[in-house]
Image (spheres, grey):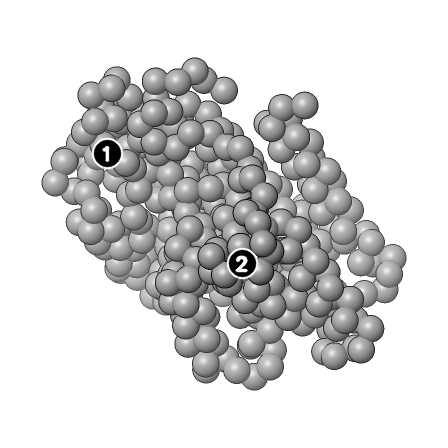
Amino acid sequence: MTSRARAITGFVVVAIALFLTPALVEAADMPTFFVIFLFSVFFWVAQASSWNVLTGFSGYFSFGQGAWFGIGVYAVAVLTGKHGWSFIAALPMAGLLALVAGLGLGLVVFRLRRLTGEIFALTTLAIAFVLAALARLVPAIDGGTGIFMTGTPIPEFLGEFNTAMYRMTLTIMLLAVLASYLTYSSRLGWGLFSIRDDESVAGGLGIPVFRYKMVALGINAFFAGLMGGVWSLRIGFVTVDEVFNIRVPLFVILMSVLGGLGHWMGPVVGAVIIFTLSDRLNSAGLTDVNQIIIGSLLVVLALAVKEGIYGRMRDRWLTTLITFFGVMVVTAIFDLTGSLISDFAIAMVTTVVVLMVPDRLWERIRGRGGPDREEGPPVGMEAVTGSGP
């Protein structure tokens, strides 16, 4: 079985298990909070994965996630709240409008060679501020009054509210992660990595630089907007300040950098770790120091594990499994927290700390080299001249 076949098989197994989870939670008489927690995780995984396709793969650092997310939120809010559209009809428009806006930006910035690096990042950040001002000033969008979403009907076949949110966010998350994986393991991914290494050389080697960047930006904007459309129901009362703020892009960047830029699994791992830790800190009444703790963790990891935590997990997979499940068993036996999610958070943090041990020290402890790295697509100029997957 090829690596792609194994990945797709694993993807299908995980998807089936996640779709059955709400039924298992209900059968086990577990709190509904588990479903709420999981669909919040799905939201961040989708956002981080879509952002990574553009920034992690092509190297174009973007703050535009908040803009695409905001377009999706307001697309559904305006169409359902002011024009009487059904939610199911309005939801695709969230992704499509974000896609159109993203491609419109790409048509301008990707044609101008000057708009790269920090200039590109600042341009994408400015888009969110422009959209926020537009929404606040135009009565047809918001007009500064906000839009209520609490009365928006959800199709009955999706179940009650929490179950419906779970199913919708799970579906979008799976599609976003699948798109990231297929991009990573295809010629498109190889081309984006080459653009990240050296855009001028990549163009000289025959890579359609402009087209590849537009595709990456389109994937990023579409899934960010689509998930924003679903999340409008979660917000309840849509306002400019609630939607167009810096929280979404900053958290997405934290998650992706922590997990590891340039690999499709990095943002998935980073999103699970960051959101779980943030949720547990908030539950413990540490909301005020939440961002300080997470930011400090990111700084330490950036110094100790520059490639991202997923790279260490992949290289030290046996240690990862033993540490994580060992801590889970210990916390469960002694009932240290009384919460499965808190046990999960402690196990993750412990595993991350263990994985931060430097490679040289780790090899001394083990007395030999670590396991071989997982095979993946070549990432660099040499990939362009090689055969396709």
- Residue nearest the viewer, comparing 145 with 337: 337
User: Which residue is at 24% across, 19% downward?
Assistant: 205
* 176 relative to 272, above or below: above
Q: SS class of the residue under badge 1?
A: loop
Pinpoint residue 388: horizontal percent, then vertical percent. Answer: 45, 17
Earlier along the polypeptide chain: callout 1 or callout 2?
Answer: 1
- Residue nearest the viewer, comparing 287 with 338: 338
Relative side of 335 to 135, left or right: right
Relative side of 188 to 275, left or right: left
Residue 83 in view here: no
Residue 108 in view here: yes
Pinpoint residue 78: horizontal percent, then vertical percent. Answer: 44, 51
Pinpoint residue 381: horizontal percent, then vertical percent. Answer: 31, 27
Pinpoint residue 182: horizontal percent, then vertical percent. Answer: 51, 30
Q: Which residue is mark 2?
A: 364
Picture quarter with the N terminus: top right
Q: Residues within 10 Å of mark 2 (few under 14, many from 20)?
A: few
- Circle number at residue 338: none
For the residue marked with disc 2, what is the amino acid?
A: Arg
Q: Which residue is mark 1?
A: 198
